[in-house]
Image: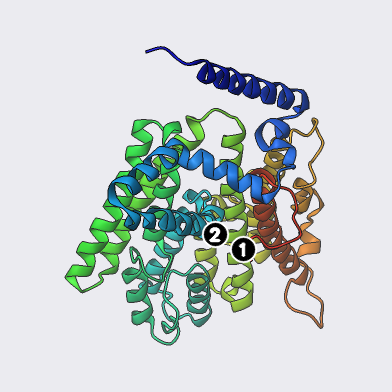
């Protein structure tokens, strides 16, 4: 079988056109953004068309017409389902994919802390119970409408245990473990088999053991704590694989930035809530706060059995040698953001400057309490600014590195 002249001419014209487009695009490419994101000059229509073509490729060109030819008009539901599914994916899923390892670790740490103190010697401390309730509700470890730990401690405890692996409503440990696995599945080719197996095993073990606990019907706290302990060990292995086995490229920096953003927001919110509820002024709340920051041993090594709030702030907020302190997290996050933006040495990017600079934080200034104002108002203002910075950086990361089109000044969804 020989090709006809029209076929050869058409093929030659096609090849020449592709080479011409490639040469034209090459001449216009000057920066990394030009190469990866088209210089951010693509409008929403072109971006959506390119994404759809990359996603559906040849099977849409040949498979869908073939299905219609064989099965008739009823196969048109494939196209309808694709349109609705693609819209739902971009609208509901794509914007939320982030690093869930830190979030899962935070929920495990908070759930373990809550169960330990709800059954411990400080279970009658109203400020501590109120603080635990506020954190559990903020991080949705319990469903809305559940009585607070102050009102019904046992009911609140059972609700935390029942929601550990609940797929409905509460975004507790199991929810974040599953989200972690789904996020990892999107970058499966970059993970080692051992790393992927650890993620899958952690999620499956969590749900299986929680299902067995629920089947027993007694919601025993000591069994739930064992499950959380094992889940924490799995996450430690997962985190180690993420940080130790990945090349220190932009993907690794984005992973690290995501974890530090989550940590900054979680810890600043928890510390602010401890002042709001008065838990920091109780012995149980003081120790619980140290446990949540994973700084109990460090604090007692430096300050023995002190309950000085200023010493607490020094360690949890200002200490640059403590990787769970807010100063360490903020400083590291600013550096990672500058590296990601390829800023010159000793210079910060615009995104880095959104995070408050720890160099300007002073213990005496943070501990000031105006006579006519709330306790330690400068510290409370700093904590709120850190939470706001975490949200802004998260939004800017999505806009800067995961959006191909420029500003449209109109809603794509309407």
Q: Would residue 360 appear left or right of 33 to someone viewing this image? A: right
Q: Quarter of the image holding residue 46?
A: top right
Residue 403 can be seen, yes or no = no
Q: Is residue 258 visible?
A: yes
Q: Is residue 395 above or below residue 255?
A: below
Q: How is the image coloured?
A: rainbow
The extreme front residue here reads: 5
Q: Would you say 169 lies left or right of 139 here?
A: left
In the orientation shown, which residue stands out farthest toward the bottom? 151
Residue 87 percent location from the top left of the image: 51, 58
The nearer-to-camera label among 2 and 1 is 1
Judging depth in this view, the residue of 32 and 203 nearest the camera is 32
| 387 with respect to 105 (left or right) | right
Q: How many marks?
A: 2
Q: Residues within 10 Å of mark 2 (few under 14, many from 20)?
A: few
Instruction: Provide the residue designation for mark 1.
Output: 413
Name the residue located 45 percent from the left edge and 15 percent from the top edge: 3
Judging from the image, what secondary structure is the residue with disc 1 in? loop
Please tell me which residue lies in front, 82 or 153.
82
On the image, numbered disc 2 is attached to which residue? 91
Earlier in the chain: of badge 2 and badge 1, it is: 2
Rendering coords of residue 334 (x, y %):
72, 44
Front-lying residue, 27 or 320: 27
């Amino acid at each position: 079988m020989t090709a006809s002249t029209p076929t050869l001419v058409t093929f030659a014209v096609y090849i020449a056109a592709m080479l011409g487009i490639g040469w034209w695009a090459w001449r216009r490419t000057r920066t990394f953004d030009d190469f990866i994101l088209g210089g951010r000059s693509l409008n929403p229509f072109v971006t959506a068309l390119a994404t759809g073509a990359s996603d559906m490729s040849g099977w849409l060109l040949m498979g869908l017409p073939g299905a219609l030819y064989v099965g008739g008009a009823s196969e048109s539901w494939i196209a309808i389902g694709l349109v609705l599914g693609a819209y739902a994916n971009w609208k509901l899923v794509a914007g939320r994919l982030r690093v869930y390892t830190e979030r899962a670790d935070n929920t495990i740490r908070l759930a373990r802390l809550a169960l330990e103190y709800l059954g411990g010697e400080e279970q009658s401390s109203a400020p501590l119970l109120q603080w635990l309730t506020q954190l559990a509700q903020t991080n949705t470890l319990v469903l809305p409408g559940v009585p607070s730990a102050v009102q019904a401690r046992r009911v609140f405890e059972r609700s935390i245990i029942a929601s550990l692996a609940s797929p409905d409503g509460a975004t507790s440990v199991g929810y974040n473990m599953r989200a972690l696995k789904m996020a990892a599945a999107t970058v499966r080719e970059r993970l080692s088999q051992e790393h992927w197996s650890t993620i899958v095993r952690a999620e499956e073990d969590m749900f299986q053991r929680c299902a067995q606990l629920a089947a027993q019907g007694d919601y025993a706290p000591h069994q739930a704590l064992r499950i959380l302990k094992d889940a924490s060990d799995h996450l430690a292995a997962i985190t180690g694989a993420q940080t130790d086995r990945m090349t220190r490229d932009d993907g690794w920096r984005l992973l690290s930035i995501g974890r530090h953003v989550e940590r900054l927001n979680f810890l600043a919110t928890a510390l602010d809530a401890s002042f709001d509820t008065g838990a920091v002024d109780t012995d149980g709340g003081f120790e619980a706060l140290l446990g949540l920051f994973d700084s109990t041993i460090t604090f007692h090594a430096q300050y023995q059995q002190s309950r000085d709030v200023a010493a607490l702030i020094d360690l949890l907020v200002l200490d640059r040698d403590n990787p769970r302190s807010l100063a360490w997290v903020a400083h590291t996050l600013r550096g990672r953001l500058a590296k990601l933006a390829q800023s010159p040495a000793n210079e910060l990017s615009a995104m880095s400057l959104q995070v408050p600079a720890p160099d300007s934080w002073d213990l005496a200034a943070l501990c000031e309490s105006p006579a006519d104002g709330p306790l330690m108002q400068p510290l409370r203002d700093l904590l709120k600014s850190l939470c706001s910075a975490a949200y802004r950086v998260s939004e800017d990361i999505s806009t800067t590195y995961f959006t191909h089109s420029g500003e449209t000044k109109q809603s794509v969804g309407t």
